[in-house]
Amino acid sequence: MTDNTKMAVVTGANRGIGLEITRQLAGKGWQVAACCRDINQGAAVLKPLQDQGLQIELRKLDVTRSGDCQALVKWLQTGEQQVHALINNAGVLLDNQVDGSADPLQLDPTMAMETFNINTLGALRMIQALAPQLAEGARVVNVSSGMGQLASMGDGYLAYRMSKTALNALTKVMAAKLANIPGGAKIRVNAACPGWVRTGMGGQNADRNVSQGADTIVWLASSDDITTSGGFYRDRKPIDW
């Protein structure tokens, strides 16, 4: 890594949108710490990208474990590396995995807690751990969903919806906080809805491919045009909360 190379941390980097985010940022010349729970799966899917000469470092990380987040920080500190973009992509959709139903009246509250622990608190753990490592002008991008918009809230998938609504609240709070921490000048925190994407979560009937789903996220993480913080975006445009 040269002095001019930017570092991105991407969670859930071993599949779907996270893998595509990793590919796109590394293709722009960034070094990417590709974080995933399953180190073997991560190694298998990332090796073809590494073989192309892309600067990708595989890191084992479970966003539900604060110790894993701290271990990542120690690795960054050992290499004296600051983080220019933190992309909180790791997430789950569990509502329909038990009986095939996404009916909120049938939702097991423990499933909602598990969803919240990964989708919302996972991002919180990462931001808290990495805040001291964020470079001036760094970006934090929380991968949210239109299903978390209060402005268009509908029926079904209650656990997932609540977790993403809470993630949007986290985005607003951290945008205000990180703008005011010592050394936090110009740190931008935004949320992005990738749309309905053909992944293991989105299914094969979705109307977008992973490249389209990753586009706005990568733009928020890397574009010099980003001057706002605390926003919610889809297709590179602000959307309602």
Image: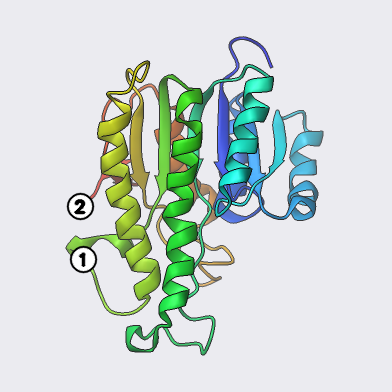
Mark closer to the chain start, 1 or 2? 1
Residue 48 in the image: above or below residue 101: above
Tell me if 206 is positioned left or right of 154 in this view.
Answer: right
Task: Identify the residue shown where x is 80% and y is 42%.
Answer: 47
Task: Decide if residue 20 is in sight here.
Answer: no
Q: Residue at x 67, y 53 (%)?
A: 37
Which residue corresponds to mark 2? 240
Q: Which mark is residue 193?
A: none
In the rendered image, which quarter is residue 16 located in?
A: bottom right
Residue density around tag 2, few if under 14, some if 14–19, many if 20 or more, within 10 Å: few
CB within 8 Å, label 1 to label 2:
yes
Q: Position of residue 25 (x, y in %)?
A: 57, 33
Image quarter for residue 171? top left
Q: Amino acid at mark 1?
A: Ser
Work out which quarter of the rendered image holds the N terminus and state it.
top right
Q: Nearer the viewer, residue 173 or 149?
A: 173
User: Which structural element holds mark 2?
Assistant: loop
Q: Is residue 111 left or right of residue 42?
A: left
Number of marks drawn:
2
Q: What residue is pinned by disc 1? A: 152
Residue drawn where x is 44% and y is 53% of the image: 121
